[in-house]
Amino acid sequence: MSGESSLLPATLRSLFSEFPYPFFPSELPDLPIRGIAIDSRRAGPGCLFVARRGGSVDGHDFISQAVERGAVAVVGDRELDSLPVPYVQVDDACRSLTYIAAAFHDWPARKLTVVGVTGTDGKTTTCNLLYQVLLAAGLRAGLISTVNAVIGDEVLDTGFHVTTPDAHDVQHYLAKMVDAGLTHVVLETTSHGWSQHRVDACEFDIGVVTNITHEHLNEHGSYENYRAAKARLFALLARTLPKPQGNPRLAVLNRDDASYAYLQVVVDHQPGVVSLAYGLDPSAGLRAADIHYSPAGIRFTATGQGLRIEVRSPLVGAFNVSNCLAALAAGVCGLGLDPAAAARGVAALTGIPGRMERIDLGQEFTAIVDFAHTPNALRVAISAARQMTAGRVITIFGSAGLRDRAKRRMMAETSVELADISILTAEDPRTESLDGILSEMADGARARGGVEEQSFWRVRDRGAAIRLGIRLARPGDVIMACGKGHEQSMCFETTEYPWDDRTAMRAALAEACGVEGPEMPFLPTQEQGE
């Protein structure tokens, strides 16, 4: 059950007093509601149970269990009668949850300045950069990302795998921020979050896009649908109610990305919303000039909008120039923060867990763990590695089961084209055949001239794949385990096995270097042979 509100108890009637969609019956009782549950197993006394339809489970089938556990009212989108508790029928229970949860917590986003960040790659880094910019400017800011929620000194884990938290959890985090006296929040939003309406009631003031490339087409059906889901962030800017603290309604767009022209048209049709483009393109409103790359980080000058900001960051790679620009555009141009303070905030972010994270146990080559799990992200990660060394680049990665199949070949093609050695391995195969996934990837590798066991290898066990990469590495090389990043589990069949690429990399390096280190985490592929 979602955390109970610290405000006066909500009632069923009050939860629908500002509800934006039709519901039946129109008159609801003043029945006290103590919490919200979307899982019947987590329903408790006095809660409202929201029955949502999922891909394989329909919450309506579990209403009786929720009522047995104490639910005093139910919301759903099927026609039902003869329930022992009040039933509110809506058009779409999933879409309705965000507004019900916001009302339960007394609309916390209306009391905060909310910056939403979306895109395919770079969202988490951009969110953390902007969060540091806000802190450096002296603001009391919070962060909700796919990694964690940061509320003052409290850090809350938001899940094993990466997506926007459920709608009632998002509103719960926002309410805790209001209670803690925070004034600003940076909210990372995924395409799943948008398609499932998890953040529709977040009253965004500024929307930022990093890029929109090939990803999640299994859920959205096409790139156009995926892009449209991301674009909902900018449509919602126009719906944000006026706030006492102001409401910039600024859309921050990536001028260098293929999505720019489409998103600019979307923004142009939103009353009261203005846009600002950032990037390397000369027409961008905020541009990067005099860029310098090194293994120690990046430095450049951000110019435009009457500004000239000298920027230094320990983050590496061209893609982080773009992420820094996005954060500066939102903070300085959108919120009017001091440019010097913003530059200090950018410099303060030394790294993100699982994002180009170096693992060093004294070896003579560079070992990195990165979250790159899309063709574009892999491309920019390899490019960043090239800027770090004159040696070879070795990549270790897989492609998830029950997800976008097209990217399996694309990931392998990208790596064979740009890296020196590619090792294809397991990455959340779920209920699909791991051998089948690796076969598809190998086909992509061969299509780009890859030769098995010369330029690319197939290794079913991810720990063994990392060990192989380390054995193949020479002094000065860069070896990268990509695709899992900070994630803490890997799914085989329907079981989540504890797994952290950083622990696995340390374990394999410790073995190779003859030093103390952690044990290699267990995966079922260890028992099945490499």
Image (cartoon, rainbow, N blue to C red):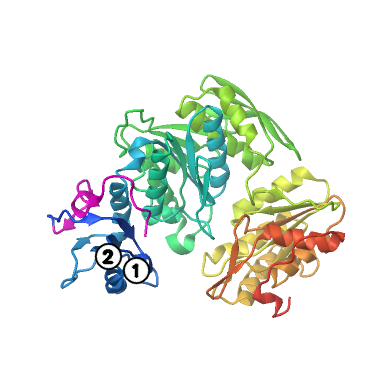
Q: Residues within 10 Å of mark 2 (few under 14, many from 20)?
A: many
371 to the left or right of 333: right
Q: Nearer the viewer, residue 348 or 381?
A: 348
Q: Nearer the viewer, residue 333 or 306?
A: 333
**Labels 2 & 1 near each other (Cβ < 8 A):** yes
Residue denoted by label 1: 40
Q: Residue at x 23, y 60 (%)?
A: 91
Asked if residue 326 shows in the view, the reply is no
The image position of residue 144, as x and y in percent, is 48, 46
Q: Secondary structure at mark 2?
A: loop
Residue denoted by label 2: 71
231 versus 430 height, above or below: above
The residue type indicated by label 2 comes to Ala
Residue 9 on the magenta span? yes
**Of labels 2 and 1, the one closer to you:** 2
The residue type indicated by label 1 comes to Ser
Q: Residue at x 26, y 45 (%)?
A: 8
Q: Residue at x 68, y 69 (%)?
A: 442
The image position of residue 124, as x and y in percent, is 55, 46
Q: Residues within 10 Å of mark 1 (few under 14, many from 20)?
A: many
271 versus 53 height, above or below: above
Q: Nearer the viewer, residue 499 or 418?
A: 499
Mark 2–mark 1 Cα distance, whole angstroms, equals 9 Å
Q: Quadrant of the C terminus?
A: bottom right
